[in-house]
Image (spheres, rainbow, N blue to C red):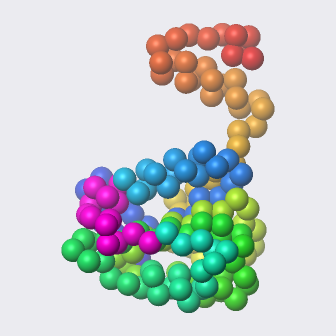
Amino acid sequence: MIMETKAKTLLSAYLAVGEDELKRRRVIGKLRSRIQDMGDLTFNHDVLDATTASGSDIAISCNTFPFASPIRLVELSHAEKLSKQDADIVAAYLAAPNSSTVLLISSEKLAKNSKLYKAVAALGPDAIIDCSPMKRYELVKALRSMAIGHGFTLTDRGAS
């Protein structure tokens, strides 16, 4: 269920959920580069779209063993568009996932009471990655911290 790495363990699946597409892209990029550091993704990377892939296609891709690498990455986008039957197949896969595959699911919206959401959440506290946009009141604090990171100082009023 969990793969050991030098720095931190990798879960068998992650769900990046929220309306902020930029955050979702960053999450996907970070995980992709982290896995690429562990092994070659040339033959070990599948990108699937839930609008065209069936649940069995996703499960087959996840159950494929990596070639010349210890790990494989399967990305599933638009998970909110999976039919209930296909989502149930993916959730069933997550009950006993392939230990050499990481499934990264990205979705703009996914109900917290859905089987798929619950199956990913059961893998660990870090499995669900919130990609919702910042609230208006959070922007000032975030802008000030970004400015400090770039060597500038901003007051609350200036950040507002």
Locate the N terminus by quadrant.
bottom left
Classify residue 69 as left or right of residue 17.
left
Q: Is residue 2 visible in the rendered structure shown here?
A: no
Classify residue 31 as left or right of residue 82.
left
Viewer-proximal residue among 74 and 114: 74
**x 66%, y 63%: residue:** 107
**x 53%, y 81%: residue:** 58
The number of numbered badges drawn on the structure is: 0
Seen in the picture, residue 149 relative to 38 is either above or below; the reply is above
The quarter of the picture where residue 160 lies is top right
Residue 119: % across, % down: 60, 77
Seen in the picture, residue 94 relative to 103 is either above or below; the reply is below
Residue 85: % across, % down: 70, 89
The quarter of the picture where residue 138 lies is top right
Residue 56: % across, % down: 56, 89
Q: Is residue 15 visible in the rendered structure shown here?
A: yes
Seen in the picture, residue 139 relative to 50 is either above or below; the reply is above
Residue 43 within the magenta-colored segment of the rendering: yes
**x 69%, y 23%: residue:** 140
Residue 5 within the magenta-colored segment of the rendering: no
Outermost residue toward the left in this view:
68
**x 62%, y 28%: residue:** 142
What range is drawn magenta here?
A: 34-46
Seen in the picture, residue 48 relative to 56 is either above or below; the reply is above
